[in-house]
Image (cartoon, rainbow, N blue to C red):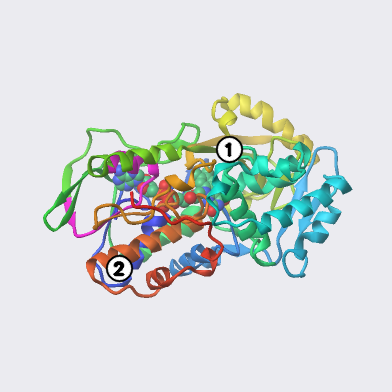
Amino acid sequence: MVGGGLAGITAALDCAAAGASVTLLEVRRRLGGAAYSFDRNGLEMDNGQHVFLRCCVAYRALLRRLDSDHLVSVQPRLEIPVLKPGARAALLRRSSLPAPLHMAGALARYPHLTLLQRLGAARAALGLMRLNLGEEELDRQTLGDWLARHGQGAEAVGALWDLIALPTLNLPASQASLALGAFVFRAGLLAGADAGDIGFHRGTLGETIGRPAETALRRAGVEVRLGWRAERLETIARGLEVHGRTGTDRGSEPDRADAAGDTAGGRAGEGHSSGLSAEAVIVAVPHTRAAQLLEPLLGARASRLEALGTSPIVNLHVVYDRPVCSESFAAGVGTPVQYLFDRTAAAGAPAGCQYLAVSLSAAEREMGMSVDALRERYLPALAQLLPRARRAKVESFLVTREHAATFRAGPGVAALRPGPQTALPGLLLAGAWTATGWPATLEGAVLSGHAAAARALEKLGIAPEGHSAAASAGPSSSAQVRAGSARTPA
Ligand SMILES: Cc1cc2nc3c(=O)[nH]c(=O)nc-3n(C[C@H](O)[C@H](O)[C@H](O)COP(=O)(O)OP(=O)(O)OC[C@H]3O[C@@H](n4cnc5c(N)ncnc54)[C@H](O)[C@@H]3O)c2cc1C
């Protein structure tokens, strides 16, 4: 197994549970991949705010396997407070009616749209529901164009549709693939009344994913090698050999805080090189790394993974000297603040302070801004939304930037996402970027891990058990709504 993010963790657990002998190689000195925490000024901060939905059954099952499900909570009912400068806070809250009626009341009362806009949005939502997700045509257009054709103007898109598109697709509706957009709205809002109830990490990502995963993997008998960078793969008579280096990780993380992060870290030329052979290798690294690693074996099929592109996420971590916000999380409309989260308790902030994390998806513009420029733009914006922030002192202001947070979920992306099987029988792929049907999410990463493990076990002639057996037997309930995504092998 190469890569210790959620995909690699899941695949390693599945393979070990079925009785395979597994070694997991991870370049960093911790597990968790794109979902991690770091220490700064005595606080444990997450690189980015990660939420999930009740319908993310594979991710939630993984947390149960890691024994950390008590560190997350799912809202009893979908409820999104929406803040707008100069306006009263609105609440998008589902009712107990069956889908799609469960959102009708929330939409009818939503004050950030006019009555006509609300009626139009309801009609468009029903139209989205009727789309055939298996149709390839859907991936050739943007969600924005489709919404425009269905009467959704810029205001409706900004105040409603982008509230969902940005955090789930990491692109605004105007740039996102209609296929993935329709999938997200259907899976999260229209498939079942409770599907879109939002799940939060009450603990930090390190507490919830990285550390318990290491314990669970070691307990399952997986040999976990941290600080091990895979550099080259070659075929041998009985499988594959992974060549790499140890001791190449930078060791500490934050460092991505405000340095355009390099997921793999490390400097070439350090450490000791060695090789490991295996009958099957699952490559579960980010797609840009996978392209480089696999190119010598798979040629153009590997290099075209680069075409998946990337989309950045920026998080602002603001510690105030007093409580300024009563919401544990909220969305913003008519403000550059997309979403904010109260992370005071999770991070262990001192009593009396409040630590708010502002999450900015598709943050191309913010990637290029200095910390001072971000401070100048966002502190007044927060003060506009949160009157108590106007008198509060900002104790610290930190920025984390993930320049390749996700692949770019634009039109044409479906054809670029490979399935778990490559042209070489013992070489499998996993990662949120593979053809899971989901956008780049925690759920997609876990599903991809199950799928790759099922193929690897098949190659080894080992019967899958538990989770990977379920993955090979057919779609989980979270995958039942997946968009048509059968792919040719990479
Ligand atoms: C800031 C941010 C916010 C996000 N918010 C959400 C959210 O709210 N909800 C949601 O569902 N998803 C969210 N995501 C997406 C989610 O985190 C990812 O889709 C998921 O974690 C990807 O898991 P993965 O295992 O596919 O890949 P990764 O997590 O990228 O794991 C790949 C691993 O491979 C390792 N690696 C790379 N190169 C090598 C090498 N040469 N040798 C050995 N190891 C190597 C890396 O260090 C890494 O640990 C967010 C992502 C970011 C960055």
Cβ at disc 1 under 8 Å from ligand 1: no
Estimate the x, y position of residue 94 in percent, counting from the top left. Answer: 75, 62
Q: Nearer the viewer, residue 17 or 233?
A: 233
Label 1: few (<14), some (14–19) or many (≥20) C-alpha neighbours in 10 Å: many
Q: Of discs 2 and 1, which sits in the foreground?
A: 1
In the rendered view, does 197 fall on the left or right side of 423? right
Indicate the quadrant where residue 364 lies: top right
Estimate the x, y position of residue 405 in percent, counting from the top left. Answer: 49, 42
Cβ at disc 2 under 8 Å from ligand 1: no
Q: Nearer the viewer, residue 427 or 399?
A: 427
Q: Spatial distance from mark 2 to mark 1, Cα to Cα?
A: 37 Å
Task: Determine which residue is flagged by label 2.
Answer: 16
Residue 430 sits above or below residue 363 on the image: below
Task: Determine which residue is flagged by label 1.
Answer: 362
Estimate the x, y position of residue 434 in percent, counting from the top left. Answer: 42, 51
Residue 291, magenta (yes or no): yes
Q: In the image, what residue type sits under mark 1?
A: Ala
In the rendered view, does 321 fall on the left or right side of 69? right
Could you tell me which residue is drawn at 54 percent across and 66 percent down? 480
Which quadrant holds the N terminus?
bottom left
Judged from the image, the secondary structure of the residue bearing numbered disc 1 is loop
Could you tell me which residue is drawn at 49 percent across and 69 percent down? 476
Quick check: can you spot residue 32? no
Estimate the x, y position of residue 437 in percent, counting from the top left. Answer: 50, 55
Q: In the image, what residue type sits under mark 2?
A: Ala
Label 2: few (<14), some (14–19) or many (≥20) C-alpha neighbours in 10 Å: many
Could you tell me which residue is drawn at 65 percent across and 50 percent down? 351
Q: Nearer the viewer, residue 333 or 315?
A: 333
Q: Nearer the viewer, residue 62 or 186?
A: 186
> Which badge, 2 or 1, is on the more N-terminal residue?
2
Q: Which residues are magenta?
A: 276-294
Judged from the image, the secondary structure of the residue bearing numbered disc 2 is helix
